[in-house]
Amino acid sequence: MKFRRFLLAGLFLVSSFGCFSQKNSYVLYFKDKPNNAKDQLEDCISNAAMYRRMKNNISFDTYDLPVNRAYINAVRNHGAEILLVSKWLNCVVIQCDTLPDFTDCQFISRIIEITATGASISNNEDVSFAPAPSGNSYLDQLSIVNGLPLHENGFYGKGVVIAIMDDGFLRANEINGLQHLFKENRVVAAKNFLDNASIYNTGSGHGSCVLSIIAGKTNAFSGAAPNAQFMLFRTEDINRESLLEEYAWVVAAEYADSVGVDIISSSLNYSVMDDSSQSHSYSDMDGKTCPISIGAQIAASKGILVVSSAGNDGASEWKYVSAPADAQDVITVGGVTMEGNRWYGSSVGPTADGRIKPDICALSADVVMINPVNDNLLTMSGTSFAAPVIAGFFACMVEAFPNSPSSYLKHVVYNTSSDAETPNNEIGYGVPDFEQAYCIVGIVDPEAQFVNYRVYPNPFSSSVSISCTRPICSVCVFSVDGQQLPFSEEIIDDTNVKLSLLSSYKGYVIIQVVLSNNYFKTFVTYRY
């Protein structure tokens, strides 16, 4: 992806770019993970992440297990500086002047050299940098997907956590239209996965524009989910195009998963690299080859709604969606005009293995956002600015139906889109109708957003009580690694039950309660 030389309202943004130094970098893949890795799960997975897995009926697997610490220490002892550690890919990215002799490290399965050479400009750029004309309204991008009724019903993404991967978030902490996020402590994480520079002093402004489309709020503008919580991650270096950025994205997604993020919004796409030997071919766009696509697919398999821009190569010789938009379960967002026609630059499918992409579309022509230079509104075009609208309204859906599996919400949104009966490789299932999706989910379980509960005491020693506003039909108790734990049950009445664990297990406890109408609720507590 590149939005280098990112122009806003006639001005170049100037920031202090941090990047990896020009030492050589390598990826070291490992053969296995430690036998006792399950013992470390509690250190790797938060309560929120465990709840998301249980809500989506997802078991723990080897991807959740950490990288062998002995392997990391051995690599470090050979004189290499470790930049990134990925448990999903079971690898480390190192930096060194000369590759050490690792012949005695039989645990290394393969080594890949990755370079970060000089800057280049790709065709995959967002275009149309101009102040917002008086006729342009932010309501266009919200209304074309029929998301405003969710706002009218009071859903603005409250309590939903969205991670944004981008090139930094220049001046995001100073922009008037984003100040509510900081005053209300709703930026819950801000992390630079490339270096130690502040994410608010790096980047082109692209990340701040994307954030404003989701979270902005002024008298003249509203994002799709201004009440959500946010994790802001820098994984993109606008000065170069390298596989380093893909690995940084994966590690950021792992972190987002571990702390319980609900949605990932990513407006980054990769195909052509500065070092042509690292470039991806169309045959690589099968969702299983590019590191970032592998990571995005794993993130989606953990119950995260991963939203990715399709890319802006639709009018170029390449024309196809690029990584991670090729991943099967990623929500790949293409772009349309206000008339519902494919925006000329929106990348198309199929993927190399023949799947339809993009999945759905949103407005990408003259999208209104907040200018990080001067706090005014401006319009820009590109699928980068379609994806955050979709991510924002998915956050409103999650707020409305917090117990509905993400795969179900995605299924309903796809099937209420404009071209659901005849999906194609131009616009996928078409433009969503979020009001219709909201109504359908509400009809299936009209009480879904009204289930209240209490688990006490938390933490507990031997017994824990559960109180719900709907009748409790049955209960199961699991350890953090998915083992069922024995317990005795004292039924107080149809909505209150007291459990006593019969084993000596101590640590995080996952309690799954089946309520009336086969609706289930999952609680995470701690037994000491």
Image (cartoon, rainbow, N blue to C red):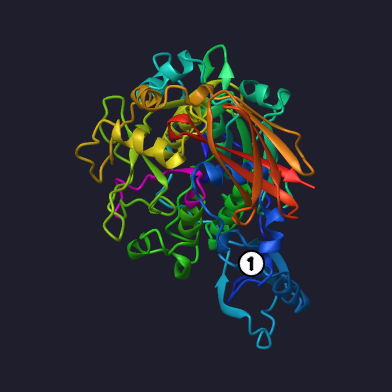
Residue 307 in magenta stretch = yes
Q: Does residue 261 sit above or below 352 in this rendering?
A: above
Q: Position of residue 226 (x, y in %)?
A: 57, 24
Q: Quadrant of residue 36?
A: bottom right
Tag 1 residue: 93
Which residue occupies the foreground of this view, 439 or 144? 439
Q: Is residue 287 left or right of residue 354?
A: right
Report the magenta stretch's main SS: loop
On the image, which quarter does residue 201 sit in? Answer: top right
Where residue 1 sits in the image (x, y, percent)? 47, 50
**Element under label 1?**
strand
Q: Is residue 414 above or below residue 434?
A: below
Amino acid at dot 1: Val
Residue 122 on the magenta segment:
no
Q: Is residue 62 visible?
A: yes
* Residue 22 image point, x, y percent: 66, 65
Q: Nearer the viewer, residue 5 or 486?
A: 486
Q: Is residue 528 left or right of residue 90?
A: right
- How dense is the environment of label 1, judged by Cα within 10 Å: few (below 14), some, or many (20 and up)? many
Percent position of residue 95, x then y = 68, 69
Q: How many marks?
A: 1
Q: Which residues are magenta?
A: 300-317
For image coordinates 42% across by 64% down, the residue present is: 289
Q: Residue furthest left?
A: 422
